[in-house]
Image (spheres, grey):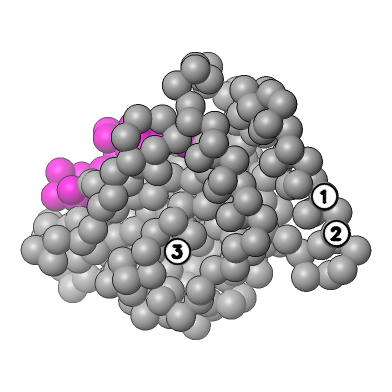
Amino acid sequence: MDSDIQLMAWHGWGFDHTCWRSWENILPDHIRISLFNRGYRGEQRDITFTGRSARNIVFAHSFGLHLCPPSQLARADLVVIFGGVRGMHPEAAQFNRRSKLVLGNMIEAMREDPGAVIRKFMQNCYRPDPAPEIDIQNYRFEKLRHDLQVLNECSLEVEPLTKAKKICILHGSSDKIVPKAKGRELYNLLSRHSSYFEVKGAGHALPFTHTEQCWAFIEPELRSTGTD
Protein backbone atom coordinates (compact mmCIF):
# COMPACT_ATOMS: atom_id res chain seq x y z
CA MET A 1 0.00 0.00 0.00
CA ASP A 2 2.49 2.61 -1.20
CA SER A 3 0.47 4.81 -3.57
CA ASP A 4 -0.06 8.47 -2.73
CA ILE A 5 -3.08 9.13 -0.51
CA GLN A 6 -4.64 12.41 0.63
CA LEU A 7 -6.30 12.37 4.04
CA MET A 8 -8.49 15.28 5.14
CA ALA A 9 -9.53 15.55 8.79
CA TRP A 10 -12.47 17.45 10.28
CA HIS A 11 -12.56 17.95 14.06
CA GLY A 12 -15.70 18.18 16.16
CA TRP A 13 -17.31 20.85 18.34
CA GLY A 14 -14.92 22.53 20.79
CA PHE A 15 -11.76 21.13 19.16
CA ASP A 16 -9.34 22.55 16.60
CA HIS A 17 -6.89 21.18 14.05
CA THR A 18 -4.22 20.49 16.69
CA CYS A 19 -6.26 17.61 18.12
CA TRP A 20 -4.90 15.33 15.34
CA ARG A 21 -1.24 15.61 16.47
CA SER A 22 -1.17 12.03 17.76
CA TRP A 23 -1.60 10.82 14.17
CA GLU A 24 1.70 12.33 13.01
CA ASN A 25 3.69 9.32 14.24
CA ILE A 26 1.07 6.76 13.15
CA LEU A 27 0.38 7.55 9.51
CA PRO A 28 2.81 6.21 6.89
CA ASP A 29 4.74 8.74 4.79
CA HIS A 30 2.68 8.25 1.63
CA ILE A 31 -0.47 9.58 3.37
CA ARG A 32 -0.58 13.38 3.19
CA ILE A 33 -2.85 14.89 5.82
CA SER A 34 -4.76 18.18 5.52
CA LEU A 35 -6.42 19.57 8.64
CA PHE A 36 -9.65 21.56 8.73
CA ASN A 37 -9.97 24.25 11.41
CA ARG A 38 -13.42 25.60 12.26
CA GLY A 39 -11.95 28.66 13.95
CA TYR A 40 -12.99 28.09 17.55
CA ARG A 41 -9.32 28.83 18.18
CA GLY A 42 -7.06 30.30 15.51
CA GLU A 43 -8.13 31.18 11.99
CA GLN A 44 -10.69 29.14 10.09
CA ARG A 45 -9.06 26.85 7.54
CA ASP A 46 -11.05 25.10 4.83
CA ILE A 47 -9.65 22.12 2.95
CA THR A 48 -10.47 20.25 -0.23
CA PHE A 49 -9.28 17.23 -2.18
CA THR A 50 -6.69 18.22 -4.77
CA GLY A 51 -7.54 15.48 -7.26
CA ARG A 52 -3.85 14.56 -7.58
CA SER A 53 -3.91 11.52 -5.26
CA ALA A 54 -4.52 7.86 -5.97
CA ARG A 55 -6.98 7.66 -3.09
CA ASN A 56 -8.88 10.07 -0.85
CA ILE A 57 -9.67 9.60 2.84
CA VAL A 58 -11.93 11.62 5.13
CA PHE A 59 -11.55 11.55 8.92
CA ALA A 60 -14.56 13.10 10.65
CA HIS A 61 -14.83 13.36 14.43
CA SER A 62 -18.33 13.89 15.86
CA PHE A 63 -19.73 17.24 14.59
CA GLY A 64 -16.94 17.23 12.00
CA LEU A 65 -19.08 14.84 9.98
CA HIS A 66 -21.61 17.67 9.62
CA LEU A 67 -18.92 20.28 8.91
CA CYS A 68 -17.37 18.26 6.08
CA PRO A 69 -18.88 19.43 2.76
CA PRO A 70 -21.07 16.76 1.10
CA SER A 71 -19.04 17.15 -2.10
CA GLN A 72 -15.91 15.97 -0.26
CA LEU A 73 -17.67 13.01 1.34
CA ALA A 74 -18.87 11.91 -2.09
CA ARG A 75 -15.30 11.99 -3.48
CA ALA A 76 -13.83 9.82 -0.72
CA ASP A 77 -12.57 6.29 -1.20
CA LEU A 78 -12.81 5.85 2.57
CA VAL A 79 -14.73 7.88 5.14
CA VAL A 80 -13.77 7.22 8.76
CA ILE A 81 -16.36 8.43 11.28
CA PHE A 82 -15.31 8.75 14.92
CA GLY A 83 -18.16 9.10 17.42
CA GLY A 84 -20.49 10.21 14.66
CA VAL A 85 -24.21 10.81 14.72
CA ARG A 86 -26.87 11.57 12.14
CA GLY A 87 -28.80 13.86 14.48
CA MET A 88 -28.21 14.78 18.11
CA HIS A 89 -31.67 13.96 19.44
CA PRO A 90 -33.49 10.61 19.74
CA GLU A 91 -36.65 10.17 17.70
CA ALA A 92 -38.79 8.90 20.60
CA ALA A 93 -40.77 11.87 21.95
CA GLN A 94 -39.95 11.46 25.65
CA PHE A 95 -36.20 11.10 25.03
CA ASN A 96 -36.24 13.81 22.34
CA ARG A 97 -37.60 16.42 24.77
CA ARG A 98 -35.03 15.60 27.44
CA SER A 99 -32.15 15.64 24.95
CA LYS A 100 -33.22 19.03 23.59
CA LEU A 101 -33.56 20.38 27.13
CA VAL A 102 -30.01 19.29 28.02
CA LEU A 103 -28.53 20.86 24.90
CA GLY A 104 -30.69 23.96 25.35
CA ASN A 105 -29.34 24.39 28.89
CA MET A 106 -25.82 24.02 27.54
CA ILE A 107 -26.48 26.75 24.96
CA GLU A 108 -27.79 29.10 27.66
CA ALA A 109 -24.86 28.30 29.95
CA MET A 110 -22.55 29.48 27.16
CA ARG A 111 -23.89 33.00 27.84
CA GLU A 112 -23.18 32.90 31.56
CA ASP A 113 -19.92 30.94 31.90
CA PRO A 114 -18.66 29.63 28.56
CA GLY A 115 -15.32 28.57 30.02
CA ALA A 116 -17.02 26.22 32.47
CA VAL A 117 -19.07 24.71 29.63
CA ILE A 118 -15.97 24.03 27.53
CA ARG A 119 -14.07 22.50 30.44
CA LYS A 120 -16.92 20.20 31.39
CA PHE A 121 -17.48 19.19 27.78
CA MET A 122 -13.81 18.31 27.31
CA GLN A 123 -13.79 16.30 30.53
CA ASN A 124 -16.79 14.33 29.31
CA CYS A 125 -15.25 13.90 25.84
CA TYR A 126 -12.04 12.39 27.17
CA ARG A 127 -13.55 10.26 29.94
CA PRO A 128 -12.47 7.74 31.11
CA ASP A 129 -9.10 9.31 30.14
CA PRO A 130 -8.04 12.66 31.64
CA ALA A 131 -8.73 15.74 29.54
CA PRO A 132 -5.79 17.98 28.53
CA GLU A 133 -5.41 21.42 30.06
CA ILE A 134 -7.03 24.12 27.92
CA ASP A 135 -6.64 27.90 27.78
CA ILE A 136 -10.18 29.21 27.49
CA GLN A 137 -8.94 32.73 26.72
CA ASN A 138 -8.21 31.66 23.15
CA TYR A 139 -11.73 30.47 22.34
CA ARG A 140 -14.30 32.28 20.21
CA PHE A 141 -17.34 31.67 22.36
CA GLU A 142 -19.91 33.17 19.99
CA LYS A 143 -18.88 30.77 17.25
CA LEU A 144 -19.07 27.86 19.68
CA ARG A 145 -22.52 28.91 20.82
CA HIS A 146 -23.70 29.33 17.21
CA ASP A 147 -22.57 25.81 16.34
CA LEU A 148 -24.32 24.38 19.40
CA GLN A 149 -27.52 25.81 17.98
CA VAL A 150 -26.71 24.20 14.63
CA LEU A 151 -26.14 20.88 16.42
CA ASN A 152 -29.49 21.27 18.13
CA GLU A 153 -31.28 21.21 14.78
CA CYS A 154 -28.97 19.37 12.38
CA SER A 155 -29.70 16.11 10.60
CA LEU A 156 -27.05 14.56 8.41
CA GLU A 157 -27.68 14.37 4.67
CA VAL A 158 -27.03 10.70 4.01
CA GLU A 159 -26.89 10.61 0.19
CA PRO A 160 -23.31 11.99 -0.18
CA LEU A 161 -22.06 9.28 2.20
CA THR A 162 -23.64 6.59 0.04
CA LYS A 163 -21.43 7.79 -2.83
CA ALA A 164 -18.23 7.20 -0.85
CA LYS A 165 -16.66 3.86 -1.75
CA LYS A 166 -16.31 2.65 1.82
CA ILE A 167 -17.23 3.85 5.32
CA CYS A 168 -15.60 2.87 8.60
CA ILE A 169 -17.50 3.83 11.78
CA LEU A 170 -15.56 3.82 15.05
CA HIS A 171 -17.19 4.41 18.43
CA GLY A 172 -15.79 4.41 21.94
CA SER A 173 -17.33 1.77 24.20
CA SER A 174 -17.35 4.33 27.05
CA ASP A 175 -18.54 7.37 25.06
CA LYS A 176 -20.29 9.84 27.41
CA ILE A 177 -21.27 12.32 24.68
CA VAL A 178 -22.79 10.18 21.91
CA PRO A 179 -24.30 6.85 23.05
CA LYS A 180 -23.12 3.71 21.25
CA ALA A 181 -26.68 3.23 20.06
CA LYS A 182 -26.26 6.37 17.93
CA GLY A 183 -23.17 4.93 16.26
CA ARG A 184 -24.97 1.68 15.54
CA GLU A 185 -27.94 3.63 14.20
CA LEU A 186 -25.63 5.35 11.72
CA TYR A 187 -24.10 2.01 10.77
CA ASN A 188 -27.56 0.46 10.17
CA LEU A 189 -28.34 3.38 7.88
CA LEU A 190 -25.14 2.84 5.87
CA SER A 191 -24.55 -0.86 6.40
CA ARG A 192 -24.44 -1.81 2.71
CA HIS A 193 -20.90 -0.48 2.36
CA SER A 194 -19.76 0.29 5.89
CA SER A 195 -18.05 -1.37 8.84
CA TYR A 196 -18.65 -0.70 12.54
CA PHE A 197 -16.10 -1.13 15.33
CA GLU A 198 -16.18 -0.29 19.03
CA VAL A 199 -12.91 0.69 20.69
CA LYS A 200 -12.87 -0.84 24.15
CA GLY A 201 -12.39 1.61 27.01
CA ALA A 202 -12.41 4.68 24.75
CA GLY A 203 -14.56 7.75 25.21
CA HIS A 204 -15.79 10.34 22.73
CA ALA A 205 -12.24 11.59 22.05
CA LEU A 206 -11.21 8.12 20.84
CA PRO A 207 -9.15 9.23 17.80
CA PHE A 208 -6.94 11.31 20.11
CA THR A 209 -6.71 8.98 23.13
CA HIS A 210 -6.69 5.62 21.32
CA THR A 211 -4.94 6.52 18.08
CA GLU A 212 -3.07 3.24 17.59
CA GLN A 213 -6.17 1.14 18.30
CA CYS A 214 -8.17 3.21 15.81
CA TRP A 215 -5.49 2.83 13.14
CA ALA A 216 -5.46 -0.94 13.67
CA PHE A 217 -9.12 -0.97 12.55
CA ILE A 218 -8.70 1.61 9.80
CA GLU A 219 -5.63 0.25 8.00
CA PRO A 220 -7.28 -2.98 6.76
CA GLU A 221 -10.29 -0.96 5.59
CA LEU A 222 -7.97 1.35 3.67
CA ARG A 223 -6.12 -1.58 2.12
CA SER A 224 -9.40 -2.97 0.84
CA THR A 225 -10.06 0.25 -1.12
CA GLY A 226 -6.96 -0.18 -3.27
CA THR A 227 -5.40 -2.78 -5.45
CA ASP A 228 -1.86 -2.54 -4.08
Q: Is residue 28 magenta?
A: yes
Tell me the element at label 1.
helix
Residue 21 visible (yes or no): yes
What quarter of the picture does the C terminus occupy? bottom left
Q: Nearer the viewer, residue 155 or 211?
A: 155
Give coordinates of residue 215: x percent, y percent: 38, 48
Query: Residue beneath label 3, please?
Result: 168
Residue 149 shown in magenta: no
Give the Cα distance between marks 3 and 2.
30 Å
Name the residue at 53% across, 20% down.
136
Vertical relation: 196 (above or below) 23:
below
Label 2 Cα crowd, 10 Å radius (few <14 / some 14-19 / many 20+):
few
Q: Which comes before the other along the chain, label 3 or label 2? A: 2
Question: Could one spot residue 123 in this view of the protein?
Answer: no
Residue 23: % across, % down: 33, 38
Residue 67: image location, x then y, percent: 44, 56
